[in-house]
Image (cartoon, grey):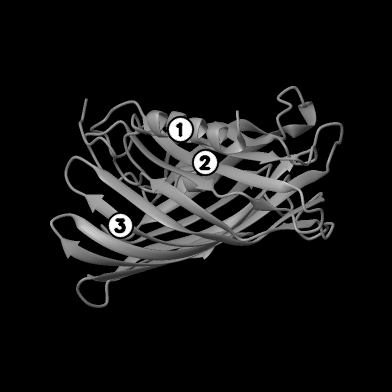
Amino acid sequence: MSLSGRSLLLLAASLGATLWSSGRLEAQVDESLVARRWKMDNFWAETYDKPILSSQGDIKETGENIQIFHWDSEGRVKFDKKDLEPPVWIGYRFLTVSVFSESDLYNHTFSDVALALAVRLGSIADNWSVVASAGMGTANDGRWDNAHALFPVAALDFARKIDETTLWHVGIGMDGNRGLIPLVPLPYLLYETELEPHLDVLLGFPRSEIVARPIEPLTLTARFVFPSYAAGRVEADLGSGWSVFAEVSRRIDGFHLRHTERTRQFYEMNAAEVGVRWNNKWVDLSFSAGVLFNQRFFTGPDIANRTRGNSIDDLAFIALTLPSTFWRIPF
């Protein structure tokens, strides 16, 4: 079967799987699992899925061909669909980068999969709520038996609610596959508020997000997550649940190499895309097309200590994004 044929089958399989997704929150398995509020009741889960299929191109240094299928899936699940302060919930991250290439070095499916459990521990002096999470994951290059690819994830969050829209979060979080200092727990401080009816902010470390609606029908979003994710988006509402958008993003993901202990294969992906979104009480679905540019593979223990690696041609791509709730049926 050709590279394109196999990729299309993978895309079809992934789209079939995402049809069963029931929501979206940018909740992974680190501090974001415990520091983000549940805002939508009468649903079991909030998830996000985005499969991306690129065109074929070449590795610039070797001339070997390459095609990439990138599927980012993450979210969280609670056990009482009506409870906005559940005592226990689960977070997951499922990232796969399937590379089809003449180069044996890259011709693998790279996976970063993790699962964590969050537990509400109670409160301190009736002012601060306390939540903890812990879990495990693996980031590998197709060798699931690689014990060096296993990593822990954990967080301890102290949150103080000032009013209905304003919260402080102070805590410590660890993601064992973080691009920098992965096995060191890092302190974090987050401030979440609605500055005015058209400006929502989440400011702090290791993540910040600003959502502004300066004029109708525009929504502007900027997001940063330490150490290697950033995105900016402009969306215009067309009415009747339809909108158009343009987005630019950058991310670097790492996967442990087989037969090594600390060395990881990193993939840097920069994307620019335009698309259309259909959002109503039943469905939230986006289709987009764009270009992957300044792509690069490099190796090292982290993104600061690395080889130069190999760069990839700019590749056209198509993507399907399922944010928020896809099937909005509270089963």
Q: Nearer the viewer, residue 83 or 181?
A: 181
Residue 33: image location, x then y, percent: 47, 43
Amino acid at pointer 2: Trp
**In this rendering, position of residue 177 left or right of residue 304:** left
| Residue linked to disc 2 | 71
Q: SS at mark 1? A: helix
Residue visible at 45% across and 28% down in the picture: 13
Q: Residue furthest front?
A: 2
| Nearer to me, 82 or 15 | 15
Residue 251 horizontal side relative to residue 243, left or right? right
Instruction: Calculate the distance from the C-alpha at mark 2 to the C-alpha at mark 1.
Output: 8 Å
Q: Which residue is mark 3?
A: 276
Where disc 3 sits, the SS reads strand
Alpha-carbon distance for marks 3 and 1? 20 Å
Q: Amino acid at mark 1?
A: Ser
Considering every residue shown, the one lying at the far top of the view is 145
- Label 2: few (<14), some or many (≥20) within 10 Å? many
Amino acid found under the numbered disc labelled 3:
Val
